[in-house]
């Protein structure tokens, strides 16, 4: 049964996850002895990078990245493979989300939840958290994941030059601060929080295409500046003492991968591996991106799934960062 990228590709990613752990262990927290936190539930907030869509209502959902299938030519998705980052965090604790509950013995009424949503930005976090508080609350046994920001950066960028760079920069800084406030709110409720920085949209195929199609200014550089300001505002706002909030520096990892071509077998940083012209959804979406709908020659060596969403290999690296942080943070 062929369900994922080659084993060689998977093992190549392990080295990056271990190397990346050095980034997160050095960021916040105490090095003293502590009992490892074991979550009884994982709850995810943010945008589509943390979403599993169970559109077929069979607990075997699709993700906004490359979806593994049973075999080439067999389109049945296998959601337990090519796990997105918050799935990896849940797996660390032996937990599953209801949208992907396909084990030999499926979990009975899994309590972990995905509140994240497609298109969400920083100011949607309040409503997502409110929905969770109205349906089971949050407490000391919960591990919370938060990843949001790329939609804020893109949405503000799209208002340029009607709005000046000064104004859209202020707006993304406000979004970063809002994310930080919501993260602090989650921690105050007693949950442990893993908050990931957002990836540089100037490095994404979207940013590269914007650079090529506009002559007024370097649009990719503008997107990078906006991303940097969002992440800086987020980091300045969170209460990052390491004991309740774990900061996952995903932006730094992706930046390193792009600066050093070939690291961990990544060879393409500019093209999305999913061919959306093959999508059967309206509008076309990477939700049905599978081995049968990749571009010619597409492989695990591609960093991006489409013009703005990371691919399965990058999701795997983000999951490695997050699980390392969860295990090494003195929660």
Image (cartoon, rainbow, N blue to C red):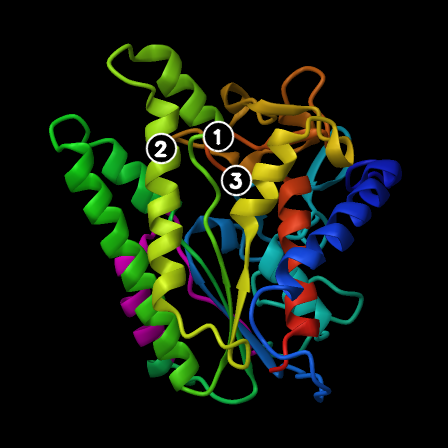
Secondary structure under the numbered disc 3 in the rendered image: helix
User: What label does residue 294 carry, if any?
Assistant: none
- The stretch of residues the image draws in magenta is 111-132
Disc 1: which residue: 204
Q: Inspect this view and state whether residue 51 appears.
A: no
In percent of width and height, residue 320 lies at 69, 56
Based on the picture, tell me whether residue 323 belongs to the magenta stretch. no
Check disc 1: other Cα within 10 Å, few if <14, some if 14-19, many if 20+. Answer: many
- Relative vertical location of residue 141 with respect to residue 15 in this rendering, above or below: below
Could you say which is closer to the camera, residue 101 or residue 23?
Answer: 23
In percent of width and height, residue 200 lies at 46, 38
User: What label does residue 287 carry, if any?
Assistant: 3
Check disc 3: other Cα within 10 Å, few if <14, some if 14-19, many if 20+. Answer: many
Are dots 2 and 1 in contact, CB under 8 Å?
A: yes
- Relative vertical location of residue 177 with respect to residue 164 in this rendering, above or below: below
Based on the picture, tell me whether residue 123 belongs to the magenta stretch. yes
Secondary structure under the numbered disc 2 in the rendered image: helix
Are dots 3 and 2 in contact, CB under 8 Å?
A: no
Check disc 2: other Cα within 10 Å, few if <14, some if 14-19, many if 20+. Answer: many
Q: Which residue is found at the position 33% from the left and 82% from the top? A: 134
Mark 2 or 1, nearer chain start: 1
- Relative vertical location of residue 256 with respect to residue 52 in this rendering, above or below: above
Disc 2: which residue: 223
Distance from label 2 to label 1 (Cα)?
9 Å
In percent of width and height, residue 285 lies at 47, 33
Q: Inspect this view and state whether residue 131 appears.
A: yes
Left of 204 or right of it: where is 88?
right
């Amino acid at each position: 049964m062929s369900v994922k990228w080659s084993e060689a590709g998977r093992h190549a990613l392990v080295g990056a996850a271990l190397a990346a752990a050095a980034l997160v262990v050095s960021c916040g927290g105490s090095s003293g002895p502590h009992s490892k936190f074991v979550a009884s539930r994982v709850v995810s907030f943010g945008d589509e990078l943390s979403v599993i869509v169970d559109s077929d209502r069979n607990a075997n959902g699709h993700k906004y990245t490359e979806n593994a299938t049973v075999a080439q030519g067999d389109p049945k998705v296998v959601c337990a493979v090519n796990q997105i980052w918050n799935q990896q965090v849940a797996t660390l604790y032996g937990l599953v989300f209801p949208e992907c509950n396909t084990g030999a013995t499926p979990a009975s009424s899994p309590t972990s939840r995905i509140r994240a949503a497609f298109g969400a930005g920083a100011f949607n976090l309040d409503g997502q958290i409110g929905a969770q508080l109205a349906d089971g609350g949050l407490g000391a046994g919960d591990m919370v994941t938060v990843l949001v920001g790329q939609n804020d950066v893109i949405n503000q960028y799209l208002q340029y030059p009607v709005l000046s760079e000064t104004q859209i920069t202020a707006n993304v800084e406000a979004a970063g601060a809002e994310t930080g406030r919501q993260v602090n709110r989650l921690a105050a409720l007693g949950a442990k929080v893993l908050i990931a920085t957002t990836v540089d949209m100037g490095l994404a195929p979207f940013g590269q295409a914007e650079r090529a199609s506009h002559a007024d200014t370097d649009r990719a550089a503008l997107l990078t500046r906006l991303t940097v300001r969002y992440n800086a505002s987020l980091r300045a706002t969170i209460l990052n003492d390491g004991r309740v909030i774990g900061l996952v520096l995903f932006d730094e990892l992706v930046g390193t991968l792009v600066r050093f071509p070939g690291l961990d077998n990544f060879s393409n940083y500019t093209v999305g591996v999913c061919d959306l012209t093959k999508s059967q959804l309206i509008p076309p979406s990477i939700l049905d991106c599978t081995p049968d709908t990749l571009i010619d020659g597409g492989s695990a060596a591609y960093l991006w799934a489409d013009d703005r969403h990371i691919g399965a290999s990058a999701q795997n690296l983000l999951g490695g960062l997050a699980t390392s942080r969860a295990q090494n943070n003195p929660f």
